[in-house]
Amino acid sequence: MSEQKPPLGSLNPELPPPLPAAPPKIWEPRAGKKPEARPQSYTARLDEILQPTSDVRLFRLTLDGYSEIIPFQAGQFIQMLCPCPDMKKPGQTKKVIRSYSIASPPEEKRFLEFCIKLVMDGKFTPTLWNMRPGDSIDLRGPYGKFVVDEPVEHDLVFIAAGTGIAPFWGMIYHLLKGAHVKRDILLVFGLRYESDMLYEREFKQLAAEHPNFRPIFTLSRPRHPETWWGETGYVQTLLPKYLKDPGHTKAFICGLTPMIEQSVAQLAKLGVTSDRIHYERYD
Ligand SMILES: Cc1cc2nc3c(=O)[nH]c(=O)nc-3n(C[C@H](O)[C@H](O)[C@H](O)COP(=O)(O)OP(=O)(O)OC[C@H]3O[C@@H](n4cnc5c(N)ncnc54)[C@H](O)[C@@H]3O)c2cc1C
């Protein structure tokens, strides 16, 4: 008998099953006070959870007792606090804190969206994966200086891999739709496989409406090169091809350290000075 192989592109059998399909949430106006801008602690409710890929979920949260979400600048992050199994004391839990970029733009007042990858042997994300709409989680924030200064006087390049895209969805949406920036905005977004894609429809829609925005999607390991419509290779290798005016560009990079270091080195080679390079490390 021949050995049974899973079809190409099937889910990793170790990953938890995808969330069952649920009807889209209806966002009703909410009673309550308006939160202040300074960082504070909140109890948040997980109102909606979406699953764009096998190991990434979008968590949409509102704040208990408040009519709106926290005022924040696109690119900032919050901290989530949650009791998680204590690896050293079986059967017991301990409070774990993790930071997450706010993915939704500040123009979205109904909920805060987070784009989070499951780290299978992680301390926090497996607990988050057990949560369901209606559950509560403690938050504090907003924090961070990974923001674009306005008015924008440079061209901008955003470089991300995987869930490093999270702050860039809100930042780019805000720059184009909220701040009406007319400078060139380039996004170079790297993923491993076609099935890892995030915010593709949203970025393509923004590009269709704003000729100064160009999103470039690249796969490091395309499974179907014959039908893949984007670039191939790591994000940093594409910078010489797409960066038009390195002497007048500010760069924002987000993701894990190796990608950030390689992108910084490539930008420096192209002539982007270090005062114009900003990054957010996830590890
Ligand atoms: C400012 C800031 C913002 C962040 N925003 C996000 C976000 O929007 N989305 C998100 O998914 N993560 C984000 N992270 C990472 C997040 O805080 C956690 O580190 C991550 O969720 C893993 O937590 P864990 O406890 O499950 O794993 P841990 O037990 O803490 O294991 C950590 C290891 O997991 C790996 N890891 C961490 N983050 C990722 C990732 N995104 N993709 C692949 N491997 C990873 C690294 O190797 C790291 O050493 C952010 C981190 C910082 C500092």
Image (cartoon, rainbow, N blue to C red):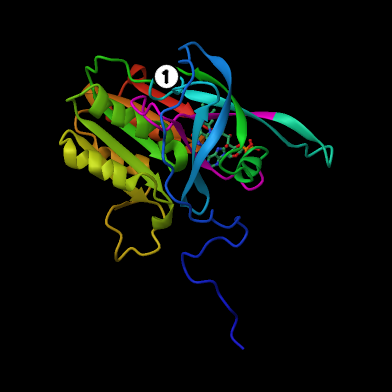
Say which of 254 and 65 sits in front.
65
Point out the image quarter for the N terminus.
Answer: bottom right
Horizontal side, residue 89 vs residue 85: left or right: right
Q: Residue at x 29, y 64 (%)?
A: 227
Residue displayed at 68% across by 30% down: 96
Residue 130 located left or right of residue 205:
right
Q: Is residue 36 visible?
A: yes
At numbered mark 1, what does the secondary structure look like: helix, strand or loop?
loop
Count of residue discs: 1
Where does residue 239 sit, x and y in percent of width and height?
29, 38
Ligand 1 is found in the corner quadrant, namely top right
Q: Is residue 36 left or right of residue 16?
A: left
Residue at image mark 1: 72
**Residue 79 occupies quadrant:** top right
Q: Which residues are magenta?
A: 96-121
Which residue reaches farthest bottom? Answer: 1
**Magenta stretch holds residue 103:** yes
Instruction: Identify which residue, 225 or 145, lies in the foreground.
Output: 145
- In the rendered structure, which amino acid carries the disc numbered 1? Phe
Quadrant of residue 67 within the rendered picture? top left
**The C terminus sits in image quarter:** top right
Residue 283 visible at all? no
In the rendered image, the vertical position of residue 163 relative to residue 264, given as above or below = below
Residue 95 locus on image (x, y percent): 72, 29
